[in-house]
Every structure is written in structure tokens, then in C-alpha cells.
Amino acid sequence: MRGKCWSAFLFIGAQATIAASPVCCRLFGFDATRMLGPDAVVCGKLVDADSRTEAQNESSAERKRATQCALEAQAQNRAFVYTYRLLAAPDMDLIVQAVFGAHGERMFMKLGLYAGENMHKVETCQSLTVLPDGKVKGAGCYQY
């Protein structure tokens, strides 16, 4: 019984820490904590490794976990941030973040290398949806 209580305490403590920290979007030049609210879910993290192949494999596995988390948060109409790294040889290394705010705010951001071009895109969208394959579909998006 004592172990179960301790586990629950650690889980609650971890959730509070996540909600209190700026979970998004330092790479894009702002803090979305207020937009996300106190009960936001954090789906995904950026992974790195010593080799490109290892980083690609770890990023792919993390994206699957992040997608499942995002789909669950989306189904519950919870505020969340969905983050993943899309790494594909030879010329793609993108960081993608989608913010689903507590009051209906929707932002879609990309940063990195795509087809040999440096990309830095921040868009506000009227609607944004995480699809079962992990892609993000936006409508009514414009540069922020």
C-alpha cells in the first residue's frame, strides 16, 4: 500500500512540475504556458543521439508515443502541446510543435532543415488536428 501511495505522489508531483514549467515554445521565441493553462498535457520530447541513424530510430519511437498521447488529449478536449522531431536522410531534420490552448488557441510551428532549406515557421490556425498517423492537419493558418 505504501508503495502505491508513493507512486501516486510521484506521478502527481511530476504532473505539477510539467504544468508549471514552460513546456513550449522556447525554440520559437515565446512561452506558451499561459495559453496552455495549468492542466496541459505534454506529448512528446525532442531526442538526440550520437549517430544520425540512432537519432532517427529514437525519434521515430518517441513520435509514436507522442502521437498516442496527443490523440488521447485531443479526444478529451484537453489543452496540450505535441512535439516531435522528424529526421530523414539526407536532408530533413525538423522540429515540429503544435499547441492546442485551453481557450481554443491553435498554433503550428516548424524549425529546421527541409529539402536543403532552413525553415522557421510559426502559424496561428483556426483549426488544427492530430491525425492517427501523427501528422498535423491545419486549416485557416497564417504566419504569426
Image: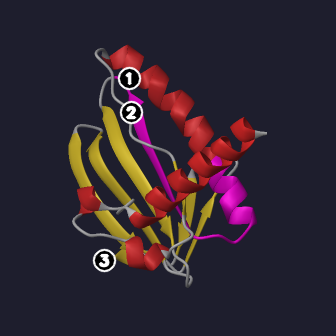
Q: Residue at x 46, y 30 (%)?
A: 59
Q: Is residue 89 above or below residue 143?
A: above
The residue type indicated by label 3 comes to Tyr
Q: Are marks 2 and 1 in contact (CB under 8 Å)?
A: yes
- Percent coordinates x, y for residue 136 in the rendering: 55, 56
Residue bearing mark 1: 55
- Residue that carries the numbered disc 2 in the rendered image: 47
Determine if the magenta segment contains residue 74: yes
* Residue located 38% across and 23% down the image: 55
The CA distance from mark 2 to mark 1 is 7 Å
Viewer-nearest of discs 2 and 3: 2
Residue 42 tag number: none
> In the structure shown, which secondary structural element does the residue marked by tag 3 occupy?
loop
In the image, farthest residue toward the bottom: 103
Query: Which quadrant is home to the N terminus?
Result: top right
Eyeballing the image, is 63 above or below 60? below
Residue at mark 2 to residue at mark 3: CA–CA distance: 26 Å
Residues shaded magenta: 68-89
| Magenta stretch: includes residue 48 | no
Instruction: Give the mark nearest the N terminus, 2 or 1.
Output: 2
Q: Residues within 10 Å of mark 3 (few under 14, many from 20)?
A: few
Residue placed under numbered mark 3 in the picture: 144
